[in-house]
Every structure is written in structure tokens, then in C-alpha cells.
């Protein structure tokens, strides 16, 4: 049995949803950018990619219609490379990497691109609500339709995770991200991207503007447990706050996986 | 007819002439279409100019026609614009000073446009809860680009013509005149040029035929919609502006016009637009007093004296300094003056820091301020405003002194918020010169000025104070003399209901949340904590002597007895953390309320948000109906202005009286009768006021 290895990764910066730089950027552009750079960094011929597997928590609208296939084309991969969109909500992207590895190990193919894309800005509020719930299922198992907030509160309750621990984790996460950014640790993984963004200009109002994004937005320098411990919970009496939950972000990331014994047919 | 027709050489000039801003009322519209017909029939005419007389091209719809059938009578604005487009001779709009709303839409219907610099250009319909209704949303994007047009339409803000002329690729102004003065001559020359240019019968350009596209329309419009929705939560019009402009980029012109009309008509029916249009009219009407004609002579106010340099005195002084009127502040002690000046400085300095005030302006204002410890120094002031402690004895001393020192003809004003202005006037030998000027705290910020008219206050004093109110940018509303005047007399009923509600089962937080959801800036309990609960305590103590029958919940007194006076003591209806203003529900207060209920034998019930809001707001309405009937307020819309500008009543609801009208007075009266049956409430109070009962019987409204 062979081993699957990750040989390259690339991602867009993460932009704040709605007011951030990707608020007008299509999922194919976000994902295409990540895949293009991951493939480039792997130094392989794009035609040798067997399949592009992309995870997406809300695969519709600007990230719909088999977004993985659109991403493959936007990334400049030849038309012969197929695309597969995977949904497992928050772990969709992780699932694609597992899936690619399994396919390599099973001997189905040797080179895969796996990753994920999300555009909360352009998708979440526009999502199709028609017959969103199966009424009988909603009765039988209402939790299936819970949102992340309700789910997080339930998890906290079930596993007795206190607000203090959540705040510590939240503040620690910010501190680590800020330290890493300051040390330039993200520079190699991020592929800067130029897009048109909707911005609120003091003089011109709501306008589109060309922006180049090369760092993650929304890192909060100097976040401490004390600073976030006073924040009001999102639900009355709840534990989840803006300080201990991840923010809404848009972005994409991809990696190239291959059989450790693979040899290019081209080179 | 309010449009003139004139031939100059071979150019026909149609001049809208409907002061003050050439509103497009029926007779103006007829004037324009008649002029176009004549000009087209006259073989000697080669081209046509449409312009405006006086201080505007046109400010748009004629507000005198608001809500009347004349506003839509043919030729309506759409037909006038159609007539411009269809003219076989070139039509040039010569624009100056003001081109807003329908005025701009009319210009966009002309074949060519020439503008003078310094002209304010806007589509301000959104401010009345509407969108432009005569093609503005479809034509403006075609001439200045989608994004600039969307911003103008969503914000309603005016932009100067020379700024618009600088937009790359703009087709709004074919040519700019060098100045407003030379516009007429330059337009005439341009019209002749256009006649020559089209002498061959070449097609006349129409804005409707210009392309309109956005390269990333889906993304941009949804971004705009998201942002606009966030910024204008309670208002339906702004996101609809986005829809209409989007239609301009995606639909054929005529289909876009149909959508614009549909949106416009729907918005016209919304309570929010009705509220905004009501406020627009109410604001203008507030300065008019039935028996004080506009031409009443006014006294000249070139200097002001303010007695008291406390929070109120300082705030009041700032209003006049801001308007360039010198102020002399008087206090008993130098320390008090020093403190007063320091507070004013701090206020201005924070404005300078925020970039809202230029340093030199700040210095100019401070230079207008002087102080004194002696009444002898203020005698020459044209107006003196007393802002001393609210106690009749203190007022007596001050006004007797003022009567001694003030020059003849000076206006003597009291900033009292509840005391009898007639009694205060009686301390002087010149009650006709005495008036109430009730500012609201912080006086330099709050828009409302209740002008209290005493029984003997002379008309010219009233007219002077109303005009002065405008000069210092206040919304001035006249109130007759009664305890609390318009605003505070009503708020007392509101506060009483808030007290009953917590006795019957609500928590303070529940009451506050319900009215805040309704749109009030702050619920009654958070408000009490901010203002200081001892204020109401003192009033209730006084009431207990004056009107012992008045029923109050004792909870507010119990709270004060616990020393919980509000934010200033770190605890009130809520708990407060040091240095923070967040209201945290208090277990101690809940406990106090529960013990009180037990002592009174009140069994609680679950009270809906709807009942909370109705009891609080309808209490205002019933008291207001009494106030109106007694002539304390001149008109219902004045009461709305008091509540909108002084008490944080939600703007989008148009004030308590308009809200009652929109709910339906029948429903309001029925609710009051229901509340009267509640044994814990005040049955006598809830008898619908006679005026309200009459209006219900006659099927009429307050407004």
C-alpha cells in the first residue's frame, strides 16, 4: 500500500464577511486563485491532476453549481480535469483532503487537489430558503436544523465547557494569530490576490474599488481574556460571544496531494 | 400660471416662477407644457430654454400640494418630462442654485443641460421615505454612472454642480456656465448653437437612450443592499432605491420606469413614509402660531445674558455662541463661573478633537463669552435667560432682580421645566416681556425648545423667541402654561404606566426592551437611571402635596430610599459597573419589587410586549389629547415635534399623535377602555379624553 503526501498548499487571505475585501468576489475566483497557486507551487503539470475536490458549507449561489469544477477551470486547469464539491458543513474542507488521500491510497489516482472555499458575504443571506426543512424530520429531530450558535451552546453545555475556558481559547487564538502574522509565518501560505471590493468611501459612498489583499483581515491585536470577558453573549444567558467565536470570513485554500511514489509522465 | 413664457430672438424661454423654490405644482406644470406647445407651434422659435426664476431652478414637488389630488393631476411631472422629450425643437435646461427631486428629473428629461457652478443637485425623496418617482432612478445612473447615482439616491444628499461636472464621462451637464450671473446669457448662446446644430433635423438626444450597465451588477447591488439595510434598519425606502437603480441596469428603460412607479406608489403607503412626510410638514408648521401672524414685528436680539453657569446655563449659552451672538453668564460665585467656562471649553475642545469644529471658530466663539458676578453688568442685554434652581422662591428673587436691572424692552425668559410661568411673570412689572424658554439637557445638543407662552406674554416677544429659536437651530414649539408643559406633563403619565407595569409583573428590563424594540432610544427605567431617579422623586413629593389623589407605583420611591438614584450613584433600576454605562439587571431591585407586590397583595401575570408599548404610548396620547383640547398645544403636530426632538420618540413612527392616527383612533380608544378595567391601573385616567372620543365618533384623526 502506498502513502499519500501533501506537497504544496496555498490560500487566499481571510477577509471579513460583508465589509471585507471579498464581499464582491465569486467562489470560483477565490477557489481558483488558491488552486492555481497550489498547483504552481507543486511544480506539476496541471493536466496531471486527477480531480479537484473542494469543500463548501453552503454550496449554492456564488459557491454553487459544482463550484469545484468551476474552480478547476478558473485555476487554469485543463478541461480534462474534473471537479467534486463536498459538503460536510464546517469540516467540508478537511473532508476533501481525507477523501483525496483515501483515493490515492486505494490506487484510484495519483494526483489530487483538495481544499475548500467559502463566501459568507455572497451566499449566506442569499441562500435558497424554499422548503428548507422537512417538516416531519423537524419534528422528529429538530436539532438537525439548528444553527451554529445553538449547536455551540449545546456542545458547551453537554461537555461542561465554561465561559472562562472559551474566552481563554478565544483570546489565545487571537494572540497566536497576531504573533504568527507579526513573525511573517503566514507569508508562505498566503497567495495575495487583487479583486474588486465594495467599500464605503467617506466621500464617494458605496463604491467598487480594486484592492490587493495579502494579509488576513480581522486579527485583533492586543486581545486579552479580560477584554473579551465582559462581552455580552449572542443568546440571552448563553456562553458564545463575539470574543470567543470565530468571525465570519470569506476565503479559499487548497493543497496538492500525491502518491509518494508518483513520477510525472511529463517531465 | 407660475411659469413665464418669453421669446428672445429665436429662442423661447420658459421660466418657472413659483416662489420660494419653483415647486412643480399644477400651475407650474401647466405653464411648462403650454410653453412647450407654443414654442413648437411657433415657426420663429428654433430652440427652447427651461429655467427657474429667483433662488432656484426647481426644488421639486410643490409641498403645498402634498397629499392633495393636485399633486397627481395631469399634466403630472411624468407628462411634462414626456413633453420635453417629445419637443421637436431642442430643449435646454438652464440650471442654477437648486435642482432637486422633480426639478432634477425635469432637467434630465430635457435634451441638453447647462448648469451654473454652485448649484445644489439632489434627489432627496428618500428623506421622505420615498424614491424619486419621475424617472430619477432610471435617468440619473445613465448620466453620472451607476455608483454615483446610487449614492445620491440612497443618501438624498445634495452635491454641487461643479463636483458632478468633474465625474469622468458624465453626461449630466453638457456645458457649465462660468457663473450663476452669466447663466442666462450663456444659455441663450448655447440654445442658438443647438438650434444650428439640429437645423438639419438630426435626432435630439434623450437620456433614456443612453446605456446603463454595471460590470459586476449582481455583486455590487447586493453589497449596496446589505450595507444600506444595516444603516437604515427601520426604513424601507433606502433598499428600494437600490432595487430601482439595479432595474435601470437590467431592464429596458420603460420597464424600469414601471418598476420605479410601482416602488414609489408602494412606499407612499408605508407608515414610515407617512411619518417622514408628516414630520417634514410638522417641522415647518411648528413655527407658525395661529394668532401671531408672520409679519409680527420682532425685537432685535444682539446680546444675551444667562443667569446660572451650571449644566443648563452653560449648554444654553453655547447655543448662542454657536450662532455668533455674544453671551454674558452670571453667577453668584467666581468658582461657579470658572467651572461653567471650563465645561464649555471641554465641550468645544472635544468637538475640535473630533474635527467637527475648527480651532479658529472655537476661539471666535469663546471670544463672544463673558462673565460677571453682578446683575448691574447685564442690564443692557436684549434677552436674559434664567437657568437657576427649580424652586419658586429662587425664581422670585431672580426675576425681581431682573425687573430692576434689565433695560426696557429686554425679554426675560425662564428655563423652568415645570413651574408656573404666569406666576414667574407676576414677580415683574412687565409680564408681557416674560416667556418660558425650556431647553432640554444637554441644551447644546437637544433640538427641542419649548417656548412657554404666559397669559400676558406679548405677541412680538413670542415671534422674537420663535425666530431666535430658528437662528440657534432649535425646533421651537409653543406650549401654554400648565404643570410640565407639553413634554413633561405627558411623560409623567408614561412613567406612571411604567411603574404600574412592574407592579403587575414586568421587570424593568422587560419594559425597557419592549419600548426600545418599538424604537425609543431608551426605555423609561434606563432613562430614569440616566437622568437621576431623584428628579421624579422630588416631583412626586410635590405632587403628593398639590394633588394627593394621584396614584403612583411606590416602587420608584422604594428604589430611591435604597439610595439607588441611578448611574450617578452606580445603581438604580439596574446595576452599573464603575465607568460603564451598561445596564445590568439587578437582583436587589427584582427582590424589592417582589416584596412590594407581596405587601400590596398583587398577584402577577405575564404581560405582552404589545401591552407594554400600548400602555406607555397611549398614556402619552391620552394626556396629549387633553393638552390639545385645553389649548396648551396649538396643534397635534406640535406635540409630535416635542416628542420626536426632545424625548427620543422613534422618528419612523412620526410622533405619538401620528402613531395613534396610524393605529386608528378607534383602536386606541378601545385599548384605553380595556386598560381602564385593570384594577391595578388608574381607571379615571384611561377614560378617553373628550377630544379623542369626539374624533373617534366623527371618524377623524389628530393630524
Image (cartoon, coloured by chain):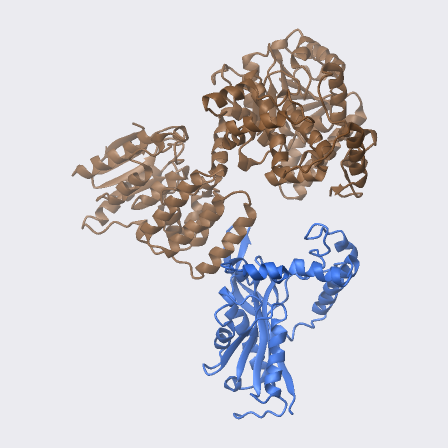
Location of residue A213 in the rendering, given as x and y in whole percent from the top left corner: 58, 66
The answer to whether residue A242 is above or below residue B310 is below
Q: Nearer the viewer, residue B424 or B255?
A: B255
In percent of the image, x 76 and y 13: which residue is there? B393
Q: Nearer the viewer, residue B553 or B71?
A: B553
Q: Is residue A229 something that shows in the picture? A: yes
Image side of residue B414 versus residue B641, left or right: right
Can residue B368 be seen here? The reply is no
Please name whichever residue, B171 or B574, is drawn nearer the observer in this view of the structure: B574
Could you say which quadrant of the image residue A218 lies in?
bottom right
Give the letter of the brown chain.
Answer: B
If the image is split into quadrants, where does the N terminus of chain A sit?
Answer: bottom right
Residue B586 horizontal/vertical position (percent): 78, 40
- Which residue, as the protein is rendered here, is positioned at the far left? B43
Give left or right: position of A173 versus A262. Answer: right
Count of numbered badges drawn on the protein: 0
Q: Is residue A205 left or right of residue A171?
A: left
Which residue is farthest top? B429
Q: In the picture, which quadrant includes the C terminus of chain A?
A: bottom right
Q: Which chain is blue?
A: A
Q: Could you tell me which residue is drawn at 67 percent across and 72 percent down?
A: A186
Image coords of residue B10 (percent x, y): 21, 38
Q: Position of residue B161 (x, y in %)?
A: 42, 44
Vertical side of A77 occupied by B96: above or below: above
Amino acid at each position: 500500500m502506498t502513502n499519500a503526501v501533501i506537497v504544496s498548499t496555498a490560500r487566499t487571505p481571510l477577509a471579513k464577511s460583508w465589509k471585507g475585501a471579498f464581499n464582491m468576489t465569486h467562489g470560483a475566483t477565490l477557489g481558483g486563485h488558491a488552486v492555481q497557486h497550489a498547483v504552481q507551487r507543486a511544480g506539476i503539470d496541471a493536466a496531471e491532476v486527477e480531480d479537484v475536490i473542494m469543500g463548501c458549507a453552503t454550496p449554492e449561489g456564488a459557491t454553487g453549481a459544482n463550484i469545484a469544477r468551476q474552480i478547476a477551470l478558473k485555476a487554469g486547469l485543463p478541461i480534462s480535469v474534473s471537479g467534486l464539491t463536498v459538503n460536510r458543513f464546517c469540516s467540508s474542507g478537511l473532508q476533501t483532503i481525507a477523501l483525496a488521500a483515501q483515493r490515492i491510497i486505494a490506487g484510484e489516482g495519483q494526483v489530487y487537489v483538495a481544499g475548500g472555499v467559502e463566501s459568507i458575504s455572497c451566499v449566506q443571506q442569499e441562500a435558497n430558503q424554499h422548503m428548507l426543512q422537512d417538516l416531519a424530520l423537524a419534528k422528529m429531530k429538530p436539532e438537525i436544523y439548528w444553527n451554529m450558535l445553538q449547536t455551540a451552546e449545546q456542545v458547551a453545555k453537554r461537555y461542561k465547557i465554561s465561559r472562562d475556558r472559551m474566552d481563554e481559547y478565544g483570546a489565545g487564538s487571537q494572540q497566536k494569530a497576531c504573533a504568527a502574522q507579526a513573525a511573517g509565518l503566514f507569508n508562505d501560505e498566503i497567495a495575495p490576490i487583487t479583486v474588486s471590493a465594495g467599500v464605503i468611501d467617506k466621500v464617494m459612498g458605496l463604491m467598487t474599488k480594486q484592492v490587493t489583499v495579502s494579509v488576513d483581515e480581522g486579527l485583533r491585536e492586543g486581545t486579552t481574556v479580560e477584554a473579551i470577558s465582559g462581552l455580552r453573549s449572542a443568546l440571552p444567558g448563553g456562553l458564545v460571544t463575539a470574543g470567543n467565536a470565530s468571525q465570519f470570513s470569506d476565503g479559499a485554500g487548497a493543497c496538492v496531494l500525491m502518491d509518494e511514489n508518483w513520477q510525472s509522465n511529463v517531465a | 400660471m407660475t411659469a413665464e413664457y418669453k421669446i428672445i430672438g429665436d429662442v423661447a424661454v420658459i421660466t418657472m416662477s413659483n416662489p420660494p423654490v419653483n415647486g412643480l405644482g399644477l400651475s407650474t406644470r401647466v405653464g411648462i407644457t403650454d410653453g412647450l406647445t407654443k414654442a413648437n407651434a411657433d415657426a420663429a422659435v428654433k430652440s427652447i430654454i427651461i429655467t427657474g426664476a429667483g433662488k432656484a431652478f426647481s426644488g421639486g414637488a410643490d409641498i403645498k400640494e402634498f397629499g392633495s389630488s393636485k399633486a397627481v393631476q395631469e399634466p403630472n411631472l411624468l407628462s411634462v418630462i414626456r413633453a420635453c422629450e417629445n419637443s421637436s425643437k431642442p430643449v435646454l435646461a438652464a440650471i442654477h442654485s437648486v435642482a432637486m427631486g422633480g426639478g432634477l428629473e425635469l432637467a434630465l428629461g430635457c435634451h441638453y443641460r447647462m448648469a451654473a457652478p454652485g448649484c445644489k443637485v439632489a434627489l432627496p425623496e428618500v428623506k421622505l421615505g420615498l424614491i424619486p418617482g419621475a424617472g430619477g432612478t432610471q435617468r440619473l445612473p445613465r448620466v453620472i454612472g451607476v455608483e454615483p447615482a446610487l449614492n445620491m439616491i440612497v443618501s438624498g444628499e445634495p452635491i454641487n454642480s461643479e463636483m458632478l461636472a468633474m465625474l469622468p464621462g458624465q453626461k449630466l451637464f453638457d456645458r457649465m456656465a462660468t457663473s450663476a450671473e452669466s447663466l442666462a446669457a450663456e444659455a441663450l448662446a448655447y440654445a442658438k448653437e443647438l438650434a444650428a446644430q439640429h437645423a438639419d433635423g438630426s435626432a435630439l438626444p434623450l437620456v433614456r437612450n443612453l446605456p446603463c450597465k454595471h460590470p459586476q451588477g449582481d455583486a455590487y447591488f447586493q453589497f449596496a443592499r446589505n450595507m444600506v439595510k444595516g444603516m437604515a434598519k427601520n426604513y424601507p425606502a433606502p433598499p428600494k432605491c437600490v432595487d430601482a437603480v439595479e432595474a435601470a441596469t437590467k431592464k429596458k428603460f420603460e420597464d424600469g420606469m414601471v418598476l420605479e412607479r410601482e416602488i414609489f406608489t408602494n412606499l407612499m403607503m408605508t407608515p414610515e413614509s407617512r411619518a417622514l412626510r408628516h414630520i417634514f410638514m410638522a417641522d415647518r408648521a411648528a413655527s407658525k402660531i395661529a394668532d401671531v401672524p408672520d409679519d409680527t414685528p420682532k425685537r432685535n436680539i444682539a446680546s444675551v445674558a444667562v443667569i446660572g453657569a451650571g449644566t443648563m446655563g452653560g449648554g444654553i449659552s453655547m447655543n448662542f455662541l454657536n450662532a455668533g451672538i455674544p453671551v454674558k453668564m452670571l453667577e453668584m460665585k467666581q468658582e461657579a463661573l470658572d467651572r461653567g467656562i471650563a465645561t464649555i471649553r471641554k465641550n468645544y475642545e472635544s468637538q475640535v478633537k473630533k474635527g467637527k469644529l475648527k480651532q479658529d471658530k472655537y476661539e471666535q466663539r469663546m471670544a463672544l463669552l463673558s462673565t460677571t458676578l453682578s446683575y448691574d453688568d447685564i442690564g443692557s442685554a436684549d434677552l436674559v435667560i434664567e437657568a437657576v434652581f427649580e424652586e419658586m422662591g429662587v425664581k422670585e428673587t431672580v426675576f425681581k432682580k431682573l425687573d430692576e436691572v434689565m433695560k426696557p424692552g429686554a425679554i426675560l425668559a425662564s428655563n423652568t421645566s415645570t413651574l408656573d410661568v404666569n406666576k414667574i411673570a407676576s414677580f415683574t412689572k412687565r409680564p408681557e416681556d416674560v416667556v418660558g424658554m425650556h431647553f432640554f439637557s444637554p441644551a447644546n445638543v437637544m433640538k427641542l425648545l419649548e417656548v412657554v407662552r404666559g397669559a400676558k406674554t406679548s405677541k412680538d416677544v413670542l415671534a422674537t423667541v420663535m425666530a431666535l429659536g430658528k437662528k440657534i437651530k432649535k425646533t421651537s414649539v409653543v406650549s401654554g402654561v400648565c404643570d410640565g408643559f407639553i413634554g413633561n406633563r405627558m411623560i409623567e403619565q408614561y412613567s406612571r404606566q411604567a411603574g404600574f407595569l412592574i407592579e403587575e409583573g414586568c421587570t424593568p428590563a422587560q419594559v425597557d426592551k419592549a419600548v426600545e424594540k418599538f424604537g425609543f432610544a431608551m426605555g423609561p427605567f434606563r432613562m430614569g437611571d440616566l437622568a437621576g431617579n431623584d428628579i421624579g422623586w422630588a416631583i412626586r413629593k410635590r405632587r403628593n402635596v398639590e394633588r394627593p389623589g394621584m396614584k403612583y407605583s411606590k416602587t420608584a420611591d422604594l428604589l430611591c430610599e435604597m439610595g439607588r438614584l441611578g448611574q450617578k450613584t452606580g445603581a438604580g433600576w439596574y446595576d452599573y459597573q464603575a465607568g460603564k454605562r451598561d445596564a445590568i439587571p439587578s437582583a436587589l431591585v427584582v427582590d424589592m419589587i417582589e416584596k412590594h407586590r407581596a405587601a400590596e397583595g398583587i398577584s402577577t401575570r405575564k404581560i405582552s410586549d404589545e401591552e407594554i408599548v400600548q400602555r406607555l404610548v397611549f398614556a402619552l396620547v391620552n394626556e396629549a389629547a387633553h393638552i390639545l383640547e385645553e389649548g396648551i398645544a396649538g396643534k397635534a403636530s406640535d406635540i409630535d415635534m416635542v416628542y420626536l426632538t426632545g424625548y427620543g420618540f422613534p422618528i419612523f413612527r412620526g410622533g405619538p399623535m401620528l402613531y395613534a392616527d396610524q393605529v386608528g383612533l378607534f383602536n386606541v380608544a378601545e385599548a384605553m377602555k380595556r386598560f381602564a378595567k385593570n384594577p391595578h391601573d388608574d381607571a379615571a385616567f384611561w377614560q378617553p379624553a373628550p377630544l379623542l372620543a369626539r374624533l373617534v365618533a366623527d371618524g377623524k384623526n389628530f393630524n
